[in-house]
Image (spheres, coloured by chain):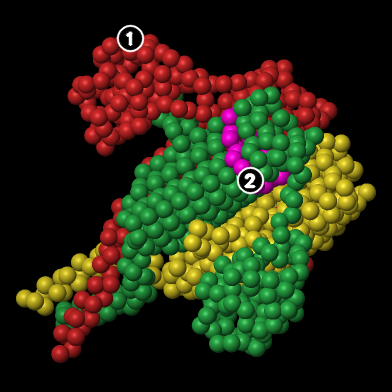
Chain colours: A green, B yellow, C red
Amino acid sequence: MKSSTSRIEVTLGELARRTQAELEGDGGIRITGAAPIDKAQPGDITFIANPRYLKYLETTRASAVVLDKEVPRPEIAALRHTNPYLTFAHIIDILYPDETEVPVGVDKSAVIERGASISEKACIGPLCHIREGASVGEGSRLVSSVYLGRNVKIGKDCLIYPGVHIMDGCTLGNNVIVHSSTVIGSDGFGFAESESGLKKIKQIGWVEIEDDVEIGSNCSIDRGALGPTRIGAGTKIDNLVQIAHNVEIGRSCIIVSQVGISGSTKLGNGVVLAGQVGIIGHLDLGDGVMVGAQSGVAKSVPAGKKVFGSPARDITETKRIEVALTRLPELLKRVKKIEDKLSD
Amino acid sequence: MKSSTSRIEVTLGELARRTQAELEGDGGIRITGAAPIDKAQPGDITFIANPRYLKYLETTRASAVVLDKEVPRPEIAALRHTNPYLTFAHIIDILYPDETEVPVGVDKSAVIERGASISEKACIGPLCHIREGASVGEGSRLVSSVYLGRNVKIGKDCLIYPGVHIMDGCTLGNNVIVHSSTVIGSDGFGFAESESGLKKIKQIGWVEIEDDVEIGSNCSIDRGALGPTRIGAGTKIDNLVQIAHNVEIGRSCIIVSQVGISGSTKLGNGVVLAGQVGIIGHLDLGDGVMVGAQSGVAKSVPAGKKVFGSPARDITETKRIEVALTRLPELLKRVKKIEDKLSD
Amino acid sequence: MKSSTSRIEVTLGELARRTQAELEGDGGIRITGAAPIDKAQPGDITFIANPRYLKYLETTRASAVVLDKEVPRPEIAALRHTNPYLTFAHIIDILYPDETEVPVGVDKSAVIERGASISEKACIGPLCHIREGASVGEGSRLVSSVYLGRNVKIGKDCLIYPGVHIMDGCTLGNNVIVHSSTVIGSDGFGFAESESGLKKIKQIGWVEIEDDVEIGSNCSIDRGALGPTRIGAGTKIDNLVQIAHNVEIGRSCIIVSQVGISGSTKLGNGVVLAGQVGIIGHLDLGDGVMVGAQSGVAKSVPAGKKVFGSPARDITETKRIEVALTRLPELLKRVKKIEDKLSD
């Protein structure tokens, strides 16, 4: 399949070997691309992770397919694995190897202040601005127009896309990815009422981002008022997400687009927030909590619980209310009828 | 009226001629600006497209007004047209001609990589960064600090505002406008669960934007995971909108601010999404579907249908439920009363 | 406490004197930082503004605490003031004095067009682009990569963070703070239907921002279609907020993250919009109106009123409906039971 990046050619047998999948069919088939099952062409490998795509298995033009162990043998060659989606992810990595984002070294149009410390193996693209006391670790890449404030620390092998702004004192671990136009370390929103209007509470904290975090584009992650705002290792954040001051997010959380988390709220590990969720401040969401799309969370949620709705309630309760709601207009009439009957 | 741009002086007769409107009154009146009816000054032309502004017709200080054919003759001069709002739009174009955003040629502070292809009639403003394999067509203007990734294609007569980031392999047609800080082609949000945490699915697709599309500021439009994310010709997108990977949007859609569309969802032509709407992934919204503000769409919607609410239902059903809801607290009491009566 | 900025050492007596607080205990104690009560260390000063933190008063390691006049005398030294939070805000200012964001003068990597007017006492950081006719007042600081369009006016002592884009003709008063990646003056979203599709209404207005306004990161504030979009003095706006064309916001309003305000809506003074609120166009919200989180406001709201919900209603009505809703599924059963009884 066409792609935005270059690709290489690999035999199916080689893919089986490298992904520890079980080969079913001709291992000599040459694979040159990966594609969804309904769009794949000869030379492509595809996958089925969701049973509703099984219907395409007979008609796909793909040369091979990644399947779990349950699906009956298809006409085309197959790789079998207990986790087909993960296997397919590894195959994409093999077929479409990373390109050099930007050459090693500092582009001559970048502005590097005195006292910045940049690894010789880091890549600093054009028009970046790196301030005094900031440091960039080995293998980290700042693609273009990235701003690092004073004393910002970037670990190893990070990938920072164009137009990211990281403000004074914030720290990123290793293997962190940040997409374009995201702001890390803007001031938290804190004001005290005074006779002459709203008095700004100076925000003297910072942001700490642990290893293997990925943050989407156009996100705002505010610095703590006092102390850190923290994002735990392996957590993944989508685009246009708001994370307020002193929020603490655990490990391996999934935070979908346009979520807003208010100040000082704490998320445990493995929390999933679907799109457009809002959470008020000073709450605790326990490990493994799942919050449905557009929910408004106004109370703490114990570990493992699924909540949904605005206001968020136990998901089964919200679903029951939703169904009941569709019967409400009719219910009003029924009650009227009963009343009429009783007043006869 | 004061404006952020310069303007010229035209007679009312000339405006009538150039917009094919019917002149009522003195064609020699000199028009020097356009303004809302309640703020217009002598020399201004104004318009009425919405009947609720008719009340201002007697007191407006405007020198002329654009009206439809139904409104009785006002005291001031008028231009009559079946579509007064469209006519007024044309008049603004005449009174306030485009200024040169940026001179033709490449500013010396821009960074142009080898192998980029820039039309001699394109305008590349200061501090832009254009990467290898990227191309910019005739008449296209990159105002300032625009980033074009590798192999990005920009058609003719596009206007790209400061701080826009367009990532590798994305394509724009002709006459596309993109406002500041918008990101086109950031990675889609795709991860597979693995024993060692969430494994990134490498996003190797791209974004295709057709002719005459306008995209607001601070939008995030993700590249396809495999294959394109697509925005059809003439579609208009407001600010802070999230468009996830592999979304396909038809022609002439209107997508208002802060909408979020999840992955692989397809919109037909002429779809209207009001502000803050969220749509889950893998749905189909048919041609002409209209979705009310803040709705949460969790099911596909057939062509021509209007839906509203979270969860989105047929708009008349949602409105009926909303009205019924205001009577619910009282209904509880009424039912209690019936029960008491029956248990007597 | 650790911070992203440097700090100084002050005696408690000195803090009492400078904040006009009443000293209780040893004025000679040396204070070197400020911290929340549950995280403070010896040398830190802390505060209690919310009674639910009183429980930490016995165990805090802080050297001193700011309290209101009601709380009984604690074991540690205290400063008494009727507004402890405001007092604490002043103490932070004292302990953590402002650092120079950027040196006075114009960085040599900035691009300044002819006819721009920059105070000799302004600070223009690297990679900024300032266009013809723009002006920057005394003491204003453009940290890095800031874009000022033609004829933009920036008053005195403004602080503009990296990556802010301010488009042609917009004006900022004095002491305005704008955080990274915010766009001021992008085009409003206006189109007229025509036979050949949606015709853009050229947006010839501007944005006026009065003194002492603070605007968060990744906000979009559109220019007026005709005339201004206006933000009144002392108003504070959080991150990722959408303000559409011709919106007028009064003084000292608080607008929390991810709010969207549609075109031509007017807010009085002291209006508070909580997170993720949406307001449709052409409404009036009177002075002191408060809107709860995630509300959708579809009607004008008179001064002083608190509304909540989507659609927004009087807050007590919405809360009553919310409680009643939890009883709705059971109510359906109760009514069925009554009907069965009556049909016996």
How many residues crowd mark 1 within 10 Å: few (<14), some (14–19), many (20+)? few
Q: Which SS does the magenta portion mostly show?
A: loop
| Residue at x 29%, y 74% (from the top left corner) | A332
Answer left or right for B9 relative to A187: right
Between A8 and C26, the one nearer to me in the picture? A8
Q: Quadrant of the C terminus of chain C?
A: bottom left
Callout 2 touching callout 1 (CB < 8 Å): no
**What is the chain letter for disc 1?**
C
Magenta region includes residue B233: no
> Which circle marks residue C28 in the picture?
1
Q: Quadrant of the N terminus of chain C?
A: top left
Q: Is residue B199 above or below residue A222?
A: below
Q: Please give the residue where the numbered disc 2 appears in the rendered image.
A: A157
Magenta region includes residue A149: yes
> Which circle marks residue A95 in the picture?
none
What amino acid type should be assigned to the residue bearing mark 2? Asp
The CA span between labels 2 and 1 is 49 Å
**The residue positioned farthest toward the right in the image shown:** B120
